[in-house]
Image (cartoon, rainbow, N blue to C red):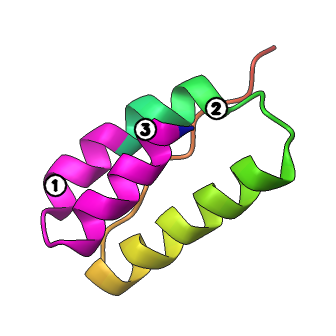
């Protein structure tokens, strides 16, 4: 989960391209997590991305 927080920090400090790369990796690892904290961290990341006018990738669910 700390990778999602890192992506949020990088997004908030002004490097949305790097943050998007980090976020893609982090969300790929976190896709199966069901915790409330994980959901909150991902929501925070998406808010920062929205402010930066970038789209965070949504990983496909495992089948």
Say which residue label 2 marks: 30
* Viewer-side label of 3, 2: 3
Say which residue label 1 marks: 17
**Sequence-first disc among 2 and 1:** 1
Q: What element carries label 3?
A: helix
Spatial CA span between label 3 and label 2 = 10 Å
Q: Which of these two is toward me, 3 or 51?
A: 3
Q: Which of these two is toward me, 50 or 41?
A: 41
Category of crowding for the residue at label 1, using alpha-carbon neighbours closer than 10 angstroms: few (below 14), some (14–19), many (at least 20): few
Q: In which quarter of the image is the N terminus?
A: top right
Query: Residues at badges 3 and 2 in contact (C-beta under 8 Å)?
Result: no
Q: Position of residue 24 (x, y in %)?
A: 40, 38
Write down the quadrant of residue 43 in the picture: bottom right
Residue 63 vertical placement versus 16 (above, below): above
Number of numbered markers: 3
**Sequence-first disc among 3 and 1:** 3
Q: Where is residue 35 in the image (x, y as percent from the top left)?
A: 85, 43
Say which residue label 3 marks: 3
Q: In this view, does 13 lie to the left or right of 30?
A: left
For the record, the magenta segment spans 2-22
Q: Is residue 22 left or right of residue 62?
A: left
Residue in view at x 58 percent, y 35 percent: 59
The magenta stretch spans residue 10: yes
């Amino acid at each position: 989960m700390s990778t999602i927080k890192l992506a949020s920090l990088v997004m908030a400090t002004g490097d949305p391209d790097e943050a998007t790369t980090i976020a893609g990796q982090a969300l790929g690892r976190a896709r199966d997590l069901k915790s409330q904290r994980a959901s909150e961290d991902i929501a925070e990341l998406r808010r920062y991305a929205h402010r930066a006018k970038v789209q965070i990738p949504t990983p496909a669910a495992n089948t």
